[in-house]
Amino acid sequence: MFRWRLSHIRVIIKNMMSDRYESGEFFRELSNQVSVPVTRRTFLRCMGAGVTALAAMSISPPCIFGRSAPDTPARFFERLEHDAVQCYQCYRKCTIEAGSAGHCKIRTNRKGSLYTSSYGNPGALNIDPVEKKPFSHVLPGSLTYSLALIGCNIDCKFCQNWQIAHAKPGSLHIQSMTPEQVGQRARLSSCPTIACTYSEPTVWSEYVLDCADAAATLGIGTLVVSNGTWTERVLDELLKRVKAIKVDLKSIEPGYYRDVCDGELAPVLKNIERIRRSGVWLELVNLVVPTLNDKPEEIKKMVRWVKTNLGDDVPLHFTRFHPMYKLQQLSPTPESTLTRAWESAKAEGLKYAYVGNVADHPGENTYCPQCGRIVIRRRGYRSEILDFREGRCGSCGAVLPGVWS
C-alpha cells in the first residue's frame, strides 16, 4: 500500500466527481496525476487512510444533529409602529409583526427587532469543482469551498436542493462556523474561493457578507449562487465584496415565476442588469424543465433579452432538469432540447452558451469567439485548459472575459 499524500487526496476528491469513476479510465488518469500506480483494489484499500487524513486536516468539522441555531440580530430591516418591522433582505420586504417570522421562516421579530436563526450554522459544507456551480469563466479546474445555510424566499416546484432550502430551523445536521473559520477551512483545503450556494444566500446575506470579508483577508475570493432577489441595499453591499455571481434565470415569463416558483421575475431582471453594470463577473443558468419552460420561442425570447440588456458575452448555461421535489412525475430534460436551446443562443449571437448536466456534449466546452478553437475542454465537472493563457486564446490572441486568476 502506498502512502497517501495531501495532493493525492485532493486529486481523488476531484476525480471522484467525474462520471468516469466506474471505468478503467478513472484509475488510469488517477495513476498519471498522482504518479503512483492505482488499481481498483489499492484504491479501495487506501480510501480509509485518505478519509482519516481528511479528518485530521479538519476539512469538515463534526456535525451536530438538530441543534437549534442561536438567534443573531439581522441588519437589513426597519422598525415600524406597534413593534412591527419591515425586512429589507429580499424583494418581498415582509412586514413582520412581533412574535412572527417572515416568508423565509428564518427571520423572526422579537419585540420590535429582527433576528435571523441560521447565522453561523451551515447545513451543508462541501469541496466542489467550481464547474459544479456552474461557473465556466471563473478559475476553471479549481475547487471551491461550498457552504449553505437553510432557507429560501421562493418555492420552486423543481428545487434541486429542497432538503436544505426548505428545511425547518433545527432539522438538519448543522454546525457552528464563524466566518473566520470558513476562510480558514477554504485555505486548508487549497480552495481559492468560497461559494455561497445550494439554498438561497439572499436570506442569509449577513453571513455571506461576513464570510466574504473574512475570506478576503486570507486572499480568498467569494462566489455567490442565487435566485437574484436581493433588495438594492443588500445587493450593493454584496457587489463590494464578491468576485462573481451566478443567477438562476428560471424563465423569461412572469407567469412561470408566479405559478412554478412562487416568485416574481421583474426584481430578478433588475438585479441581473445591476450586477452587469457593476463589473462583478456574472453568469446565468436556465434549468430547462420539460413542458414548463422548454418551448423554443420562450428560449429565444430569453436569449434576446440577455443579448439586448446585458451584451453578447455573458455566459448562459442551459442545464438538464432531473425529477425532484414537487415535479417527480416529469422526465429528465431530453438532450435534444438542450442542444436546441444551445444552438438557438449561438444563432442569436451569444458568444458563450453552455449545456450542463450532460456529459460529452460539445456545449460543455469554451470556444474562442474569434477563431472557433476550443480553449477549455470539459467533461462533467472536469476542465482541461488547452491553448489559453491569461484570458487570451493562444491561437489568435482574442481576449475572453472572466475571472482567470
Image (cartoon, helix red, strand yellow):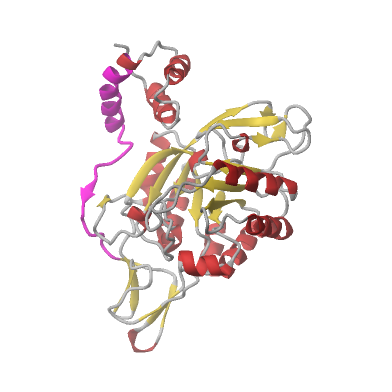
Residue depicted at x 38% and y 46%: 182
Image coordinates of residue 7 in percent, x first then y, are 41, 23
19 on left or right of 270: left
Q: Tell me the quarter of the picture where residue 95 sits.
A: bottom left
Residue shown at the point (68%, 43%) measured from the top left: 401
Does the rendering let one see residue 96? yes
Residues rendered magenta in the picture: 42-71
Q: Residue placed at 41% from the left, 64% from the top?
A: 155
Residue 86 part of the magenta-drawn span: no
Residue 232: % across, % down? 55, 68
Image location of residue 321, percent across then percent down: 48, 48
Name the one closer to the observer, 152 or 77: 152
**Nearer to us in this view, 319 or 234:** 319
Give the residue at x 44% y 52%.
330
Say above or below: 32 vs 55. Answer: above
Say whether residue 62 is magenta: yes
Can you give x and y, in whole percent of width and height, for residue 213 in the image?
47, 52
Residue 31 lies, with reference to residue 20, above or below; the image says: above
Locate the C terminus and report the quarter of the image it occupies: top right
The mark total stands at: 0
Q: Quadrant of the N terminus?
A: top left
Task: Between residue 92 and residue 155, name the one nearer to us.
Answer: 155
